[in-house]
Each structure stands twice: as C-alpha cells, then as structure tokens.
Amino acid sequence: MASGETYKISLEFSDSVTSKSYFPGFYVKQTTLTGFDVSDVGALVKEWWDVGRLDPDPQKQWHAANIALESVRLRKIDPLEPLETAYTSGLPIAGSATGASYSASSAILFSLRTDFIGRSYRGRLFLPTPSESNCQNGILADADALDMADEFVALIGDLATTGAGSAADAQVSVWSPKLAIATEVTHVKVDTRLRSQRRRQLRAPAYQTA
C-alpha cells in the first residue's frame, strides 16, 4: 500500500426472492502511508448497514428481510491488482423493514458529488430495492432520503478518520478511468425516485462450472 492509491469497496447483497446477488460499490483513496485493509473498511460498512452511524438510522431499516449484506470486498484499482479481499465477520445481516421488497429492478440511487463539475467528477451508488412499506408508487419520503444521505456522509467521515473504530484515512472519492484520478467526495444526494436497472431482471443465471 502507498499513499495516493485508489481502491474499490464493493458491497455484496443477496436477494432470497430472486436468488440474485448485487455488487454496488464506491471508491476510496489512501491518503497516508499507514494504509488500511478490508477489516478496517468492512467493519465500518457493516455498522452503517446494521446499526447506523448517527441517530441511529441503519440502512437495513429501509430494506425487506429478503435483502441481506453478505460481504464487503476491497480491491486495488490504481494501480490495478487482480486480487480481491473479503470481509464477512458477523455477516450476512438481513434487512429489517416490514413488508415485501419493491420491484427487483428498482434501486435506491446515491449520487456522490465532488467540488468539480462534469461526469468525471460524479459517482453513483445503486443500493438494492427498498421495502414496499418505505416507498409509495416508487417514491421515497423526503425525510427517509435525507436520513440515508446523512448516514452515508457519516460513514464517509468514519472511513476518513484515523483512530479506534475507524479506517486509516480511506478518503471516499470518485474514480475517473478517463482521467485516471480520484477526487474527494464532498456531498451526497439520494434520489427520492427509485431508479430502474435492467440487469436486475428476475431471471437468475444457472451456471455449471467445469
């Protein structure tokens, strides 16, 4: 590990209704020589999902029980390495919302913004569909979307802080392959409208491996 290197944190979610897994993720930049490992970042992401970072408002409260966080994965992106490590301690943890999940093709959109304009300076994080009890006609309540944004901002702060219970300066950033740079995320927006993702179709693959 070296200062200035960029990593991707991937969140593995399972859906017991569709038998599919989803791997949304975001990027972090190492800002010190000390560095961090998958246990550092994984423990914080698990707490964000399970107990929350503020009120608390854990992210799992907006998802039905068929949605579960299975693992948190870490891979170096710049310079690229063909190795991914996984954090699974205390996982999986299922959602805690009442009712069934909304349409499997729907996702909660987190827009990660920097202080600069242009596509290369904006990132997206698509979380699994919420429960039907937490959205009406595909719309999240303003208060819920704001709580989600606040909680993720708190996670960003925890990842960037060195000390007990925190990662070693893992700065959440937007990674641009085109520019080959990682730019610090400075604010988070959560769309109240659920977004549709075609790849989240109900047909699950049925591979046979040789």
Image (spheres, rainbow, N blue to C red):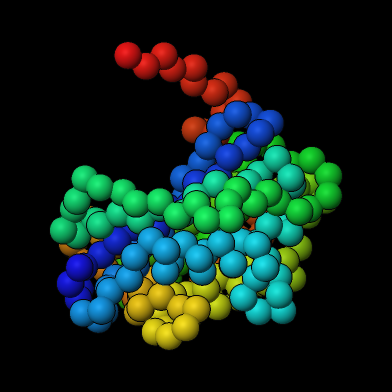
User: Which quadrant would the C terminus be assigned to in this image?
Assistant: top left
Q: Position of 116 compared to 164: left or right? A: left
Task: Please determine whether, in this image, residue 86 is positioned above or below residue 152.
Answer: above
Residue 137 picture location, percent across and down:
77, 46
Q: Which corner quadrant holds the N terminus?
A: bottom left
Q: Nearer the viewer, residue 143 or 168?
A: 168
Q: Nearer the viewer, residue 111 or 157?
A: 157
- Image-quadrant location for residue 60: bottom right
- Quadrant of the image occupied by residue 191: bottom right
From what the image shows, is residue 84 above or below residue 35?
A: above
Whether residue 78 is visible to the viewer of this picture, yes or no, is yes
Determine the residue positioned at 55% across, 78% down.
Answer: 154
57 with respect to 114 (left or right): right
- Percent x, y for residue 173? 35, 69
Identify the residue at image location x=17%, y=72%: 2
Q: Is residue 115 left or right of residue 14?
A: left
